[in-house]
Image (tube, rainbow, N blue to C red):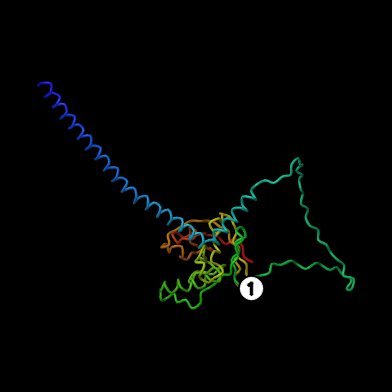
Amino acid sequence: MQNQNHKSELSAAEVEQLRRELMRAEARFRRRISRARQAKPLAEFGKFGLTAVIIFVIVFVGMNFGAFEKQAVFLLAKVESSEPVAAPNSVTKKVEFQKPKLVVAKDSKNNRLALPPLLTEVAPPDNRLIIPSLSIQAPIQTPANVDLTAANWETIESQVQDALQNGVVSFPGTAKPGERGNAFITGHSSYYPLLPGRYKDVFALLPQIKIGDEIEVWQNERKFTYRVSDKKEVSPRDVGVLENTQDYRLTLMTCTPVGTALHRLIVTAELVKSA
């Protein structure tokens, strides 16, 4: 009888142990189901987020393709020009440049020497900004009928945007190139491709300009040469860059990074020569 009672007590303990193990297994199974339910929305959200990012990148690059193309071509040309090119087993010879001789022809009719015509630089038909190092050329536009006394900045901004369709813009109220003061010129680095205008990415390469580069400005058939002295980024709300100065200064402004209006790139140059 004692052995039967002992076997009966062992069986009850085993049953209790099995019950507990089943409860623990059930708890683990419930936790796995809960984690799986939580992971599924996260995975779906991740797929949605990745798709949204890909679509955004495609649209962003498409809208600013002209500006990015200019930057890519410029950087590739810069890389190619920096690579040394030499023929194998070639001997490098020193090339001496000789001063060209003036060729004088004799005018037999008048029995006197005929000098060749002087080579002079021809002024463009419009006011023009030229940055040789970046191959940038653009006409300078001046918005008409701008009322600065009203201080209506929304109207002024609209007039500037209209003028930007045809080139870069001399900002109303600032000095003209060649004058004492702050000659302030702004241009697009990139703009909406479906809107009108031929100069939407005229300043796409402006971030590549270097201190010491020259900027040429033709104003009223006179040429003014400036040399870059400073380059910086400022907030779009920083209107201090428009303030007048007592020196002969040229300021160029565009949005940066390309395709955004997060910051303004400000390039400052000093007048070094006028003709």
- Viewer-proximal residue among 47 and 168: 47
Q: Residue at x 62, y 69 (%)?
A: 222
Which amino acid lies under the numbered mark 1 shown in the image of this protein? Answer: Pro
Quarter of the picture holding the N terminus: top left
Q: Secondary structure at mark 1?
A: loop
Residue extending farthest to the bottom is 145
Residue name at image x 51 percent, y 56 percent: 231
- Residue 12 at x, y percent in the picture: 15, 30
Relative to 202, does residue 92 appear above or below in the rendering? above
Foreground: 18 or 79?
18
Above or below: residue 193 compared with residue 72: below
Disc count in the image?
Answer: 1
Q: Name the residue beneath numbered marker 1.
A: 125
Q: Nearer the viewer, residue 79 or 109?
A: 79
Local crowd at mark 1 within 10 Å, few (<14), some, or many (≥20)? few
Quadrant (top left, top right, bottom left, bottom right) of the C terminus: bottom right
From the top left corner, tell me how far across and down residue 158 is, in percent.
46, 73
Horizontally, is 118 left or right of 143 in the view? right
Q: Measured from the top left, where is residue 86 in percent x and y?
A: 72, 45
Q: Is residue 92 left or right of residue 111?
A: left
Instruction: Please state the horizontal and vertical placement of residue 239, each as a whole percent of the image.
Output: 43, 64
